[in-house]
Amino acid sequence: MDKKEFVLKSVNDKKDLLLKVSDQIFDYAEVGFREFKTAKLFEEVLNQEGFQVEMGVGGMPTAFKATYGRGKPVIGFLAEYDALPSLSQEGGCTTRKPAAGANPDGHGCGHNLLGTGSMAAAFAVKAYIEENPEAGTVVLFGCPSEEKGDGKAIMAREGVFDGVDAAFTWHPFDANEIWSESTLANVSVFFSFKGVTSHAAAAPELGRSALDAAELMSVGVNYLREHIISDARVHYAYRDVGGIAPNVVQGSSTVHYFIRAPKSRQVKEIYERVINVAKGAALMTGTEMSYELYAGLSDYIPNHVLSEVLHESMEELGAPDYDADDFAMASRFFHETATPEELDGKRDLLRRMFGAEQAKEVEAHPLHTEIAPLVWNGKVTSGSTDVGDASYVMPTAMCKMAGTTLGTAPHTWQMTAHGNTAIGHKAMLRAGQSLALAALKTMENPEILQKAHDEWMAETNGEYECPIPPEVGPRLEG
C-alpha cells in the first residue's frame, strides 16, 4: 500500500485506544506542571506500544521523551496536554455546565486532543519503521505547561530536542490550514521596590514610597511605548501596593510586566529598556529595586519546506470526515452558545471566510470542510506559543485542524465543550494522519531534509538564546 493508505490504516488500527486516551486526559484536566496522571497515562501507553520512554526530561516531572527506531533521520512530534484554570465544562453541552467533580479546570485549548493526535502520528511512523528498520527514528516529546509558556523553552534550553532533523505538531482550531504565521515572543517579569514606611502626615520626609516608585515606573514605561516598535506590547498589573492605609508611606510594591514583540531579539532590547526605567524610578524615590524574570518564550519560525510537505499531506487526506450528526451539533454550538452580539460576530467571520452568499449555507453546517490554501503573508499573530522555542532549535512545521465549530474562540468553555465530541475526535485522528504522512515523506527524502535544514540555518544561524536564563528553573510550584 502507498503511504497515504498506510497512515490511514495505522491510525485507524489504534483508533479505540487513541479516543480512550484523549477522553481520559479530558477528564483529568490538569494544569501546567501538574499533569501527573496525564503523563503517567502517556508513559504506560507508550511503553505498551514499544517505545523507550524517558520521564522527567529537562528537570520537569511531567515532561517525557519517547523513542522508537535507530539512526537518522530523527523525526519529532510535539505533544501538549495541559489544561486551563477554571474552564471545566461538560463535553458536548451547549450551555455553561462544569463537568461533574471538584476539579474547576478544563481543556479550553484542546490539548487533550493535541497530545493524543501527536501520539497517533508517532504510532503510525513507528509502524512504518517496524516494516522499514533503516528508515530512521521517531520521537514523541511530551511537552508540559504550554499555557504558562515554560515547557518547550526549558526543553530547548536543556538540549532535549538536540539531534532532531524535523519536527511536526498541530493545534485544534476551527479551520484546517497550515500555521503559516509567526507568533509573538514575550517575557514575564516581576519588578519589586523596597522603601521605608513612615507616618504620611506626621513624618512624610522619613518615608521612601515603594508605591511611588512603581507608579513612576508605569509613567516611564508609558512614555517608552512611543519609542518602541508599533507591533510590541507592554502590559502590567500591580501585585503588591504596600497595604491599604493611605496615611502610611508604603514600604513595598510589586508590579508584573509582560513584554511582547514579533522577535525574541526585540523583546530582549525592550526588556533592557524597561529595566532601566525601573532603575530610574528607584533612583527618583530613594528606594531599592529588584526584578525576577518569571517566564519567557520565543517567536515561532514556521519552516516553509516542512510546512509545504505538511500542507500537501493534508490535501491528500482531506478534511476530517464529518457526518450529519456532527453538522447538527456544530449548528447547535454556533447558535446556542453565543449572545446576539457574539452571533453577529460569528456571521461576520463567515462572510469574510466564504463570502456573503456562501456564508448563509455554511451557517447551517458550520464546520470547516476544506483544506485552506497555503499562503505566506508574513503576518504575526497576536498570541504566543512555546513551539517558538522548539522552532529555534530544529526545523518545525505546525498545522491547525478543525476540531471545533467555526467561530469558536480558544480559552473558552465553548472550546472545552468540543474536547470529547465526535467533532474533536475526528479532527484529532486526521491531524495524526496528516502529521504522520508528512513525516514519512520527509524521512524518505534527504533533499527535503536538507532544504528544511538550510532554511532553518538561514533563519537562526544555528543560534538560540533561551529567554529563560539558566539559573531560572521551571515553575513547578504552580
Image (cartoon, helix red, strand yellow):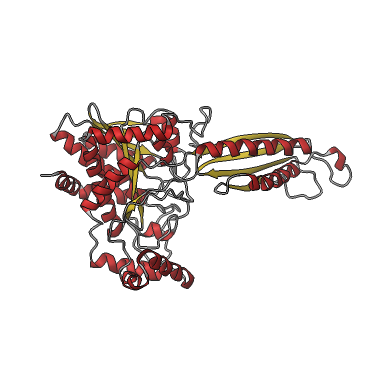
437 up-or-down from 346: above or below? above
Q: Nearer the viewer, residue 146 or 362?
A: 362
Residue 326 rendering spot, x and y as whole percentages: 27, 64
Residue 20 visible in rendering: no
Residue 110 visible in rendering: yes
Residue 468 rendering spot, x and y as whole percentages: 51, 33
Q: Nearer the viewer, residue 292 or 217?
A: 217
Q: Nearer the viewer, residue 291 or 477?
A: 291
Residue 174 rendering spot, x and y as whole percentages: 36, 58
> Which corner quadrant holds the N terminus?
top left
Q: Nearer the viewer, residue 392 or 321?
A: 392
Q: Quadrant of residue 305?
A: top left
Residue 157 rendering spot, x and y as whole percentages: 44, 30
Q: Quadrant of residue 386?
A: top left
451 up-or-down from 245: above or below? above
> Residue extending furthest left?
1
